[in-house]
Amino acid sequence: MTVTAERSADRAFIEELFARHHAEIYAYLIRMMRDADLAADLAQDTFIRAYRAIESLEDRAKARAWLYQIAHRIALDEIRHRRIVRFLPLTTESHGAAPSAEHLAMEMRLSGPLARALARIPDRQRNALLMAEVGDLTGLELADALGVSHVAARALLTRARESLRQTLADERRLEKEREAAIDAVFAEKARAADPRRHVDDSKGADR
């Protein structure tokens, strides 16, 4: 096969990958970057870089994990550049088996406590969790994307899920405390604005 023919075949292969996986790569990046326009640019960069680095893909059956690896590196480069550490969960279609608790939480748009909880867990755990729960990568695909063994990937994901559960519980507790404090402030302002109501309330309590 000539060089021109090889490049044409490579281009066709990347175009096929784009058709199959662009939506999920974009979904992963939009959660990483919290910016739809930026995520679109980085998703395009992912496939451009994939085309340029096609020779590094030794097994084309593992192309999906390879794409996530590229997208992951591009996102980290951008995060380091912009110092972005927040993530916004958005609804996406679920593929495969029944979703986990973490996937269901992300699907419910818990953009407050969940976003803060995700930002608090270690970077490596957060990235593994997003790839698994948002990207629906299998254990083997996750291992390939992270460049670790299958056992190490499973262990990392287990730690990530536990970290998220604990941190999310803490964020929800803090949110309830903040809401209670706000309610108390408004209640105090209401009593100050209407002294007669305060007196009536006191008489009712005496009875």
Image (tube, helix red, strand yellow):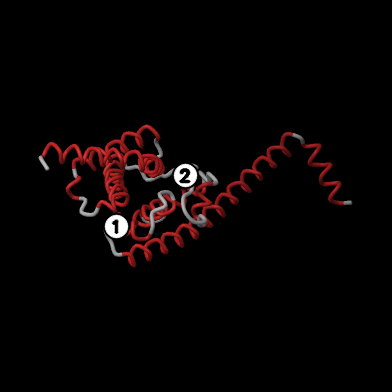
Q: Amino acid at mark 1?
A: Asp
Could you say which is closer to the camera, residue 188 or residue 136? 136
Residue farthest along the top direction in this orientation: 37
* Residue at horizontal 30 percent and vertical 36 percent from the top: 44
What percent of the width, then of the height, locates residue 157?
Answer: 40, 61
The residue beneath circle 1 is 144
Along the horizontal axis of the image, is 143 left or right of 5? right
Q: Few, some or many C-alpha atoms within 10 Å of disc 1 (few <14, some 14-19, many ≥20)?
A: many
The residue beneath circle 2 is 89
What percent of the width, then of the height, locates residue 106?
Answer: 50, 48
Residue 100 versus residue 196 in the image, above or below: below
What percent of the width, then of the height, locates residue 171?
Answer: 52, 53
Give the number of the mark in front: 2 or 1.
1
* Residue at horizontal 63 percent and vertical 48 percent from the top: 180
* Residue at horizontal 80 percent and vertical 38 percent from the top: 197
Could you say which is closer to the camera, residue 113 or residue 110? 110
Q: Few, some or many C-alpha atoms within 10 Å of disc 2 (few <14, some 14-19, many ≥20)?
A: many
Q: Under tag 2, what secondary structure?
A: loop
Residue 24 versus residue 37 in the image, above or below: below
